[in-house]
Amino acid sequence: MRSTFIVLLFFCQLMVYGQHAPADYGYRHLQTIYRGDTVEILVRSKKGEELQRKPVFLFCQGSLPIPLLVRYGPDEQKSSYPVFVFNPDSLSREYHLVIVGKPSIPLMAHTDQLRPDLTYADSSGNFSREYVERNLLDYYVKRNIAVLEFLRKQSWVKRDQLVVAGHSEGSAVAAKLASDYPAVTALIYSGGNPLGRMMSLLSRTRAAQNDTAQLDQGIFQYWQNVTAAPGNMDGTGDTFKSMYQFSYPPPMDYLKKIRIPVLITFGTKDYGAVNGIDYFRMEMIRLKKDNFTFREYSNTEHNFFPVKESGEVDYDRFNWDKVAEDWRAWLNNGRR
């Protein structure tokens, strides 16, 4: 029954999305149900090898309620922002690349339907309550495990390999998932702070601070408020509960438990991550844990764009494809 459901989804996408469908952009669209929620899944495979048995490479994206497929301009079929932050063609030669949509957010949208930062808001201009209530580390991890369980039942998925990667917020999701789900065979932790989200906020604030701005005091007061009510779900963005879960326990605690190969990638000018990664690396040396590989990208920021001497980010030099190719090389070369 479930296989029939997938086939129907694959061939009936045009009926759902009108003249535009994920297939127009080279993606298979699957759905499953988690806790009564419809979960949107996109799969990128090498053309012609969609049903060939390969391992899954699950990419856990970063923060904010952004649709997976964002169209722009009049020629929408050709004009869309990339689903993955990198060109998926290299990794899709050997894996079925998988990405899961944000909860209660449309799978596809045109920029006319979104805010300037490409986030999806309700009629009041705020993030929907359905999204806010699910924007939690625990929800993402358990939902993604349910997705992996669903995928691992498909005939085109190899069960003896499973790669999980995550960038920024997604790195924390990936780390906890890998520590909780024994089927994961390799983890890629990218652009995350092993000390947690609050330490990332503090590090970025200190990097931007000048003599007249004591912004760090606001960070400490905010954390005091969060820890006083760690289950509070008020708000229209990151609730106290969300901030607490992404901060404590810190991802370092999940990473320490992992025995599989782990690749950690980061930019040396990523002030929200580099200090935490350096500390974690020192700890792994002290503990004599040799399953971690650290790959730094000198003079690049959070998304691997170079930083000029002036401090400005050089957005003309895109390095994400190189990072993804380094991931593939690490996976293929003994993961060391």
Image: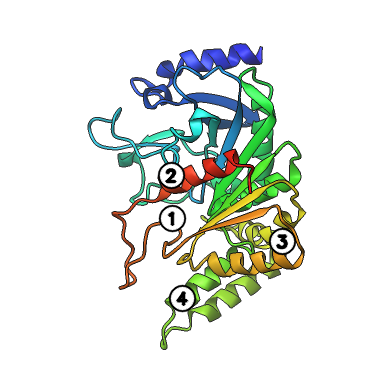
Three-letter amino acid code of the residue under disc 3: Pro
Identify the residue under disc 3. Answer: 249
Identify the residue under disc 4. Answer: 207
Depicted 28 relative to depicted 307: above or below: above
State the mark number for residue 303. Answer: 1
Q: Residue furthest front?
A: 333
Q: Is residue 35 visible?
A: no
Q: Residue at x 63, y 49 (%)?
A: 336
Judging from the image, what secondary structure is the residue with disc 2 in?
A: loop
Q: Residue at x 58, y 35 (%)?
A: 57
Examine the image and state in which quarter residue 196 appears. Answer: bottom right
Asked whether disc 1 touches disc 4, contact meaning CB atoms under 8 Å apart, the reply is: no
Reading the chain from its start, which is encountered first: label 1 or label 4? 4
- 66 vs 133, nearest the viewer: 66
Three-letter amino acid code of the residue under disc 2: Val
Three-letter amino acid code of the residue under disc 1: Asn
Asked whether disc 3 touches disc 1, contact meaning CB atoms under 8 Å apart, the reply is: no
Asked whether disc 1 touches disc 2, contact meaning CB atoms under 8 Å apart, the reply is: yes
Asked whether disc 2 touches disc 3, contact meaning CB atoms under 8 Å apart, the reply is: no
- Marks 3 and 1, how far apart at CA: 25 Å
- Marks 1 and 4, how far apart at CA: 17 Å
Residue 325 position within the rendered picture, expressed as x and y whole percent measured from the top left: 47, 43
Depicted 75 relative to depicted 168: above or below: above
Reading the chain from its start, which is encountered first: label 2 or label 3? 2
Q: Which label sits in the foreground, 1 or 4? A: 1
- Marks 2 and 3, how far apart at CA: 28 Å
- Marks 4 and 3, how far apart at CA: 24 Å
Identify the residue under disc 2. Answer: 85
Q: Which label sits in the foreground, 4 or 3? A: 4
Residue 131 position within the rendered picture, expressed as x and y whole percent measured from the top left: 55, 45
| Crowd tier of the residue under label 4, counting other residues whose Cα lies within 10 Å: few below 14, some 14–19, many 20 or above | few
Judging from the image, what secondary structure is the residue with disc 3 in?
A: loop
